[in-house]
Amino acid sequence: MPFAGATLASPTYDELRATLDWSVAERELGYRPGAPLNIGWMCSDRICQAGRGAKLALLWENFQGERRSFSFDDLRVLSNTIADFLVRLGIAPGERVCLFMDRVPELYIGFLGILKTGAVAQPLFSAFGDESLFVRLTDAGTSAIITQKKHLHKVRKIRASLPNLRHIIVVDAADSPLQEREAAFDMMAAQRVEEFSVYPTVAESPSVLHYTSGTTGQPKGAQHVHYSVISQYLTTKWVLDLHEDDIYWCNADPGWVTGTSYGIIGPWANGATQVVFDSGFNAARWYDFIEKYKVTVWYSAPTAIRLLMKEGKEPARSRNLSSLRHLASVGEPLNAEAVIWSGEVFGHQFHDTFWQTETGCIVITNFPGMPIKPGSMGRPFPGIIAAILDPTTYEPIHEPGVGGLIALRPGWPSQIRSYWNNPKAYESKFKNGWYLCGDRASVDRAGYFWFMGRDDDVINTGGHLVGPFEIESALLEHPAVAESAAVAKPDPVNMEVVKAYVTLKPGFEPGPDLELEIMNHIRKRLSPLAMPQEIEFADSLPKTRSGKIVRRVLRCKEFGEPVGDLSTIMND
Amino acid sequence: MDELAEVIRNYIIKEYLEQGDDREITETTPLITGGIVDSFSMVSLKRFLERKYGIRIPDADATPEAFDNLRSIAAVVRKFQQTTAAV
C-alpha cells in the first residue's frame, strides 16, 4: 500500500495525487505504449510467464457445496480452448459475444477467452428476462451468446428477432436436444488448447460492452477498451490492497461492471487468488464461506451489508472470521451505521468506493491506511481529477459543503470510449471539459466527498441502476395499464426500490390481485431488480402541458421532499 | 408434503421456474440460496402468501432465511394465520 504516510519512504496521499501518472501501472504490467495489449492475456498468460502458473486463481463453490478449482495455467489453457472454439465458429475480432450465465467458472474463463479472440465481451445478468435480453442483444448486434440450459428458453423466445445472432453456445447441454444455431461446448471435456495465438488487440481496441440504465430511453452499451486494465489493475492493488497471499472474495456478479472490473480483470491482472460463491444471499452460509476459505479481502455491497446487520452480530461472532483484513463496499453510498457496525463485528470497517459503469474503475474512495469518515465516499484516486460542479454553469465549486454535480476530468484509462451506436448520449455526458457522473455530492474541508443523490430519475436499487423508461415501457405492455411512471422509493435495506404509479384502462379495477399480476409481469419480462416492489393505482399522473409525465413530483412524494419550482417543467 | 406447502410449491413452479426447468422442488430445496427466488423477487412471493391466506407478514419476518425453502415459508404462513385468528 503506497501511501500509509507513516515513513519517509512512502509518499503521502497528497504527494501521490500530485505526481502520479498511469505509467506506473504500465511498467508493472510490462506494457509499452503502442505494443499489443490484451486483457485476456494479461490475466492468464502473463501470470504464467511470471512463474505463477501453478498458483490457485479461482476456487468456486455453489449452494449445493460443489467445488471446482483452477490455477492460472488452467485459466490460460481453458480460455485458449474457448477462444479457439469461438474462432472456429467464425467469430471475428470486434464482434460482440454475450455471456449469459450464472456465476459458474465458464462465465469467468469465457470472458477471458472472448477477449483473447479480439471479440467484445458482453456479460449480461442471468436473471434478465427475455425483454431485457432482447433490448441489449439487438442494440449490440450480438453475434453469439454463451449460456446454460436453464436460460436457453429465454434466448429461444427472442432468437427469431435477432438475425445477427449466429451462434447460441450451451455450456452444459449434455444430451439435451439442441436447435438450429445452437451448439454444445463443454469447457472441461473439450480438447485443451495449449497454444493459442492471441489476437493482437491494442490499447484502444474495444474489449467489454456493459449495458447501463439511464433516465431516458433504453439501456446504453458502455464501450470499454483493453487499456482499461491499467487503472483496474492499479486500483485493485491500492484500494482493495490485494497482496500475493490474499484470498479475495468479490460478491458482484460479472453481469455488472463490478463483477468484471474487480471480479475478473483487477484481481487476475494482479495474480490474486479469488473465491466465488454461486449462491443467493444467506448470512450463515456467507460467514461459513469466509471461515472455510479464510477470505482476507472482501468486496461487498451496502445492501448485503445491511442484510447482514439485520441478522445481528451473533452469526459473525460465532465463527472465526479473523482471516478478514480488509473490507470494501461498492454500488451505492455506504451509510455511516454500516461502517461503524462492520468495525465492531469484523474488527475492520468497510471502505466505501465510488465509481460506475462508465468509469470502469474506482474513482473516489476510502483507502487502506487513511482515516475513514463514516458515510463519506472518500477522496479521489491518484490520477483522477474530481470536482463538484455548479449545475447551471458547470464550473467547479470550491466552497466546502456546497452541493453540486460530481465530475471527473476525462482521460483516465478505463473511461468508456462511447455508448454503443449512441454518440449523442455519449456527448451529453461531457460539459465544459468535464465528465458528469450523474450524481450529486459536496466536498468537505479535508477533501472528502459526501454523496447527496442522483441528479436524474435513475433508480439505484441494491447497488444496481435501473432506468425508469424500460420499466414504464414494460408496464404499458400489460393489458390493464394505460399510463405508467416508475420512480425510486426509499428502502432501509436496498437504499431505493422501484415503485410504479399506473392508471388503468376502462374495465379494469385496482386491487391486490392486479398489483401482484403486474409485479410478476415486470419481474419475468425485465428482471427481479426492475420489478416494482409497490404499485400505486392513480386516477391521473402529473404531466407537463405537452403530456410528458413528471416523475420528479412522484419521487419527491416518496422521499417526503419539497417538489420545488415546477413552472418551467410543467409548461414544457 | 402437506397442502400448504403444495400450494406454495405450485406457485413457485408456475411463477419462478423458467419453461423447461425441470428441477424438483421439495420441502427443503433451497429457493433463495439456490437462485430460484432472489431477494428482490421475495416481495411478490410475500404478496401472494398474504393475499392467498389473508395474513400480513411483517418485513422483519420476511427474511431470505425464512423464505429459503417450502418448509420454512409454510411455518411463517402458519405463524401469521394463528396471529390473525387470535385477533
Image (cartoon, helix red, strand yellow):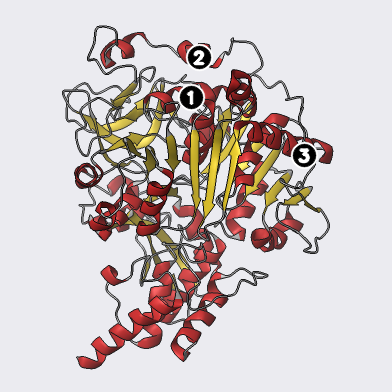
Q: Earlier in the sequence, mark 3 or mark 2?
A: 2
Disc 3 from disc 2: Cα separation: 31 Å
**In this rendering, is residue A316 above or below A520?**
above
Q: CA distance from mark 2 to mark 1?
A: 9 Å
Q: Chain of mark 3?
A: A
Mark 2 falls on what kind of element? helix
From the viewer's perspective, tell me whether residue A259 is left or right of residue A421.
left
Residue depicted at 34% across the width and 37% down the height: A328
Residue annotated with mark 2: A28
Which kind of residue does numbered mark 1 sit on? Answer: Tyr
| Point 56% across, 63% down: residue | A525
Q: Are marks 2 and 1 on the same chain?
A: yes
Closer to the camera, A564 or A9? A9
The residue nearer to you, when weighing A563 against A98, is: A98
Labels 2 and 1: the sequence-earlier one: 2
The residue that disc 3 covers is A86
Q: Is residue A269 above or below residue A125?
A: above
- The dot on residue A233 is 1
Q: Which mark is residue A568?
A: none
Q: Toward which corner of the image does residue A34 lie, by quadrant? A: top right
Which chain does tag 2 point to? Answer: A
